Image (spheres, rainbow, N blue to C red):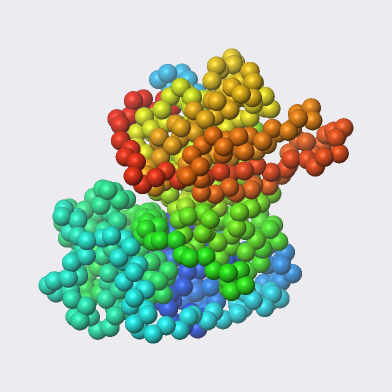
Amino acid sequence: MKQDVYKKVTDTLLAALEAGTRPWMQPWNAEHVAGKINRPLRHNGQPYAGINVLMLWMEATAKGYTAPIWMTYNQAKELGAHVKKDEHGSLVVYANTFTKTATNKETGEDEDQEIPFMKPYTVFNVEQIEGLPAHYYATATPPILSQAERNARMEAFFTATQADIRHTGNRAFYAIGPDYVQMPPFEFFKDPESYYATLAHECTHWTRHPSRLDRDMGRKKWGDAGYAMEELVAEIGSAFLCAELGLTPEVREDHAAYIENWLTVLKGDKKAIFTAASHAQKAADFLLSLQPAPDPEPDAERAPAIGPAPAAVAEDPAEIPPDRGGISQSSPPSTGARNPERAEGGSVLSFPDRGPWGKAAYRGNCSGHVYRALFERLRPQVFTDPTVGSGTSVEVARSMGIEAYGLDLHSGFNIIGQRILEAVGKPSDLVISHPPYHNIIVYSGQVWGQEPHPDDLSRCATEEEFMDKLILAMKNQRNATKPGGYYGTLIGDVRKNGQYSSYQADLIARCPKQELRAVLIKEQFNITSNQKTYPLSLPRIMHEYLILWQKPHAVTVPTPPRSDPQSALFPL
């Protein structure tokens, strides 16, 4: 019989709540983290997200695990280790969507429909596994800070959010109308940690404002389902935030009343906790995204990441969750860095497999791990791909909780002749394209459609025309980007008949020099040239460039009405 994942997870949470405990308030006594909350990590050091965090926290508490690292049976096996006899794994889930083509009964036309699915899989804590490299079992040593240093760090974090925080009265709350957080004076709290944990809770509420995450859970009055859901989001979101900040979440005085409200909501909707955890993760990520990028550390002083190189362990695609990512061979957990050149991981992207995202129907779509790595670095709230192809980038973005839009010739959008900003209806934090190359793989009339399209970049008569149109596309992307946001493209070089053309160099030369922020090298795998023989002995081109520019903060971008609300949007 097919397992009902929603019911199983919800029933586990209900049992904990009915016992008078909050599952997200339990695993702080781990020896590995000196009494502080810790996010569960994958074998490669990447943190889990959303509902998987709650599920693994509950498992760690129930079974007494103190190590934060989890992996699948196959991952352990490929590391030369084995799961101990009679050990049972823990459930986590992989949530995504697939596209199904169906006939519209009213129009008689075929339409793509987005079908969500959730797949459970099993992981084991490293304490259940023997034979792993020693660093998997190492006890983390948190930095020793004075109380003054900790307070200064917390103050800097919440100041960077630019939230309006007022200190008065004896109640802590967020007022959405006037948009401010009220906190009792610092001296009213039993200790600084209680103050900052409470502030984390209220700032999680602060993210719901329409100008931020625009989260509306249907709240009407105290105690109703919408109120209970928003409080659940704030509770879980602040726990996620405390995991990043090294805080212990605060137990509220109205503990019992809130638990009663949550029980009512969870018993009425087995998917409610999944929704709440998703919104909570978005809220925590939003607050982290507001932080300035950390100063780079010298390589010799940089602490080693937990776990081996991701490339060292082959993963079963069925076991790759949506919040898996990789930037380099030793990617540490995300620190909230927003600038690519300051993010951990370096400037080389190397992912041999496509991952579980998108389809190979449109050649040229790169590995979904590339987009995943980019989103981990830049943390966009709104992402647009104006040459989306089979939809890989949009699938990855949505699996990470990012609002994403995909446009393409095959969905009725022309990046040369139509404005991205008008098609989407709002500016984006990140606009990335992966356009077809000139005269390499012919797109319109071959890969897609019956007739050549006049603005198809792959059908330009000359390289000069191709580059001129590519510049128009980049201007279109820049116009669709928020001030301070990033725009860019994934493009490489070509060699035909011995003649080498450096598209990336030409593009960089013609785009605003003062806005260039990063050039990442992406290795190419499974390319057709590997099966061909060439007369020249020169090295084959086996890489592309992901080029990023940043739009200046001083530029004002209007938000126009959507001119054609649906026809141009990729139907994922």
Picture residue at 58% right of the left edge, 28% below the top: 467
Along the line of sight, which residue is nearer the eye, 425 or 398? 425
Position of residue 550 measured from the top left corner of the image (x, y, whole percent): 45, 45
Picture residue at 38% right of the left edge, 32% below the top: 421
Q: Is residue 90 left or right of residue 495?
A: left
Along the line of sight, which residue is nearer the eye, 505 or 92? 505
In the image, residue 207 sits, relative to residue 90, either above or below, namely above
Position of residue 571 measured from the top left corner of the image (x, y, whole percent): 46, 32
Q: Is residue 527 left or right of residue 68?
A: right
Picture residue at 56% right of the left edge, 55% below the top: 325
Along the line of sight, which residue is nearer the eye, 563 or 268? 563
Picture residue at 31% right of the left edge, 40% below the top: 556
In the image, residue 505 sits, relative to residue 518, either above or below, namely above
Q: Quadrant of residue 159?
A: bottom left
Q: Quadrant of residue 544?
A: top right
Res 514 visible: yes
Q: Is residue 370 left or right of residue 420?
A: right
Q: Quadrant of residue 492?
A: top right
Position of residue 505 measured from the top left corner of the image (x, y, whole percent): 62, 38
